Amino acid sequence: MQTHFEKELGQLKNQLLEMASHAETAVRMSIRSLVERDDELARKTILDDSVLDHFEMQVDDTSIHLLARAPLASDLRLITVAMKISRDLERVGDEATTIARRAIELGQEPQLKPYVDIPRMAGMALEMLADALDAFVRGDANKARAVVPRDKDVDALNKQLHRELSSYMIEKPGNITRCLNLMVISKSLERIADHAANVAEEVVFLYEGRDIRHSSNGG
Amino acid sequence: MVSRVTVKAPEVPQVAGGARVLVEIEDLKLYYGRALALKGITMNLREKLVTAFIGPSGCGKSTLLRCLNRMNDLIDSVRIEGAVRIDGEDIYGPKIDVMELRKQVGMVFQRSNPFPKSIFENVAYGLRLQGMKSGSELDGIVEKSLRGAALWEEVKDRLSANALGLSGGQQQRLCIARAIAIRPRILLMDEPASALDPIATMKIEELIIELKSEFTIVIVTHNMQQAARISDQTAFFYLGELIEFDSTNKLFTNPGKRQTEDYVTGRFG
């Protein structure tokens, strides 16, 4: 039979997973609003960000309440990791908002080019996030560890897109506004991938007690 | 031209204090009659560190503590096998003077036990037994010990008052002062704060952290957060066996054994 404390730890995990689901949806919605040039959807994404802000405060509140019980070992790691993951997810939501705002701007002008790389980057970042969270649920540190290096692929795509958009800007000054907006979106997606990698590193710490952050070989 | 100063991040410190091994416990077994209470304990205790013994009731932690100054000799049915070496010498060897041992290895108990004498005489007792006469030297050591036990300021104006008039926390600190007056190498503490209120407990904990600069301390506690707060190394015992022994930080944040994890998270015991 579960103790009250164990039940509360379970609630903390569930809060995080719900928060993650909202964050993933926000990113998807923001990319859709770009690709489908849907201002309405973009505005909804921006408004919904407050849900994630609220979640972050709730997770922090629950965590502090649990820390006051002076937990140890894996319980202690779960709570400190939960606070960090909620931070990363809240930032993911902020990036989705940025993308949505840029999408509204881009909607004012004709589409510059077909969107190929951006949806691709979004897909990669979202898959990283999904895998990190799956690893969290299953207690699979190896799966989490495998997410971290995939960040480089998203970085590479961001750089590539950056170069491409730069040449569009040189070609014609009229492209500049649209290109700058797209660069911001690309950067936001690169940051979302960073946050997904952070979550993965936290999951490794949670299940192995090993801190693999800031190491070149991913632990 | 601006030059950048590179600052190296500090290394994460390992176990603080001396690395030297002071106490070697080798395959120690203890029998109460036929019952095997300690099932072959092997571990080394390092100098000037606080080592905590934790584990559920009946796991043998207090029994092991009492082996370190041969208090178990006072129990008829006890039989020991194996060795306990302090500074390389087996304290169960035939030539050991047990009285001398107990001066070197002092003990503080769960229930404070001041003598029904004055505060001064409590601390002076061990010194007088050693032959020290009244005078400035004795006074000096008594004061130093009371200061060392963080009690001096509270009692300096009433050293001749009866020790039994002190509060529980003060009595316990008096017992610590009494123990350190004769300059032991090792201080054994068997749940020294479990009979005290939170403020008194905090004072004892602060004191222990300070004392380790001079003494090697072994503390039995059932309060894991206390062990986490004040000890450098922690040993977890279960049913007479040593299950895990590691730096306190490691044991309480990422224990190696499943049993340890279950115990410190309160899943059992």
Image: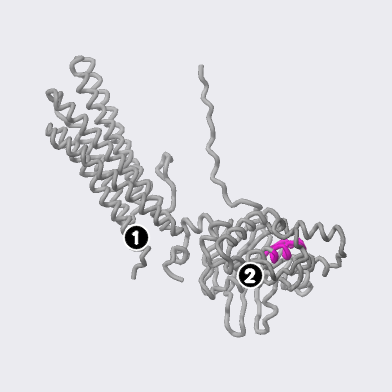
The amino acid type, in three-letter code, at marker 2 is Leu
Q: Specify the subunit that label 1 lies on.
A: A
Determine the image quadrant of residue B181.
bottom right
Query: Which residue carries the number 2 mark?
Result: B65
Q: Is residue B88 visible?
A: no
Instruction: Give the residues drawn in magenta, as a range.
Output: B174-187
Residue B87, how many percent across, how many down?
72, 62
Residue A123 at x, y percent in the picture: 22, 40
Location of the N terminus of chain A by quadrant is bottom left
- Membership of A50 in magenta stretch: no
- The secondary structure type at the circle numbered 2 is helix
The residue that mark 1 highlights is A8
- In the image, taking residue B147 as reference, residue B241 lies left or right, namely left
Q: Position of residue B241 (x, y in %)?
A: 54, 71
The foreground one among A186 and B127 is B127
Label 2 resides on the chain identified as B
Location of residue B34 (image quadrant): bottom right
Give the residue displayed 27% in from the left and 25% down from the top: A162
Q: Nearer the viewer, mark 2 or mark 1?
A: 1
What is the crowding at mark 2: few (fewer than 14 residues within 10 Å), some, or many (at least 20)? many
Q: Are marks 2 and 1 on the same chain?
A: no
**Depicted B76 relative to depicted B53: above or below:** below
Q: Residue at x 27, y 48 (%)?
A: A19
Observer able to see residue A129: yes
In the rendered image, which quarter contains the C terminus of chain A? top left
